[in-house]
Amino acid sequence: MKTVSVVMCTYNGAKYLREQLDSILNQTYPIYELIVQDDCSTDETVDIVKEYFLKYDFIKIHQNTQQKGITQNFISAIHLAKGEYIAISDQDDIWDLEKIEKQIKCIDNNLLCFSLSSPFTNENIPLNIDRRVPNYGLERLIFYPVIPGHAMLFKKELVNLLPEEKNWSYDAQLAIAANIYGGKLSVCKEFMTKHRRHIKAASYVKPDNNRRTINNIISYMWTSIIQYRNNYPNMQRYMNAVHQYMEKYPIRPDNLKTALQLSKLLGTNSFFAQVKASLLCIKLRNKIFYASEKSTCIAIIRAALWPILCCKYYKK
């Protein structure tokens, strides 16, 4: 039987932690080890984990002496895992009890697989429930980590292929590395994670109003222009780092060639480079969006403006 390590990083998550721990411990597939790495919590998080630690000998607790932040906490924690496969867990979600069992079957010989997740909340906050399967090709992944860490199961060998880059989100690093070195990702088209949304969650963002009214379009464009002015240097640095990492891979399949071309253009501070990037985005319009755009006309316009629109992803 293949061994699975579950890696959970915590920070002041006492309120919801027990529910997630229970959903992990009650998986139909046996868990080889559960690694919990805490990032200097000031609430009862560590005390709760210690309660479970006394009951289950495969739980391992690590406490940071200094705060690492989300990405570095996860990256350092997954390096501690000893299982053949690694699953990432947030501290406040709830897993389907068959999540690991189904993902082990789904991953096949690929480096990484992911399942779908559905947001839920106990608070009076807006949610955007998107039931589409995201575009997870490399041309999309270089822009944004559409595959959240909590949805992933991956082979341990992937850990040694990650870029030495502290400023990428950990899930972007995993997805891009798996795509480059594995050539293919597996997707389990089932909702296996209840992804809790609450105001204090590190990843919570109030969903946009996606209705295509004139006022919304004008507001969206104006906001995008402001974000482009403010965030373009961040995007440029990010694209250059992504390009340097991808360039190290000796084999150049078509998706890597286009991703390299696109990242190089977007990392170049030149008007003509941005024009070329827009033209390339039009050509790649079915690969760079979260999901396919039904209207060809709207897709072309969005793609042409994509170097501006995507800058919202690079806010520091």
Image (spheres, helix red, strand yellow):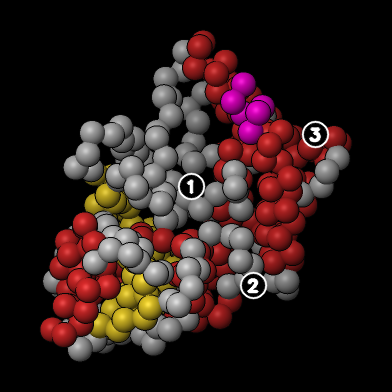
Q: Residue at x 35, y 59 (%)?
A: 151
First-in-chain label (1 vs 2):
1
Q: Is residue 198 above or below residue 206?
A: below
Residue 253 in the magenta stretch? The answer is no
CA distance separating discs 3 and 2? 31 Å
Residue 222 seen in the current view: yes
Which residue type carries mark 1?
Asn
Q: State the residue lying farthest toward the top.
A: 214
At horizontal 86% and vertical 36% (from top left) the residue drawn is 272
Which image quadrant: the N terminus? Answer: bottom left
Residue 164, numbered label = 2
Mark 3 highlights which residue?
275
In whole angstroms, how far apart are the C-alphas of marks 1 and 2? 25 Å
Report the magenta stretch's main SS: helix
**Residue holding disc 1:** 135
Residue 288 seen in the current view: no
Residue located at (82% from left, 47% from top): 268
The x, y position of residue 306, in whole percent, is 65, 34
Comes first in the chain, label 3 or label 2: 2
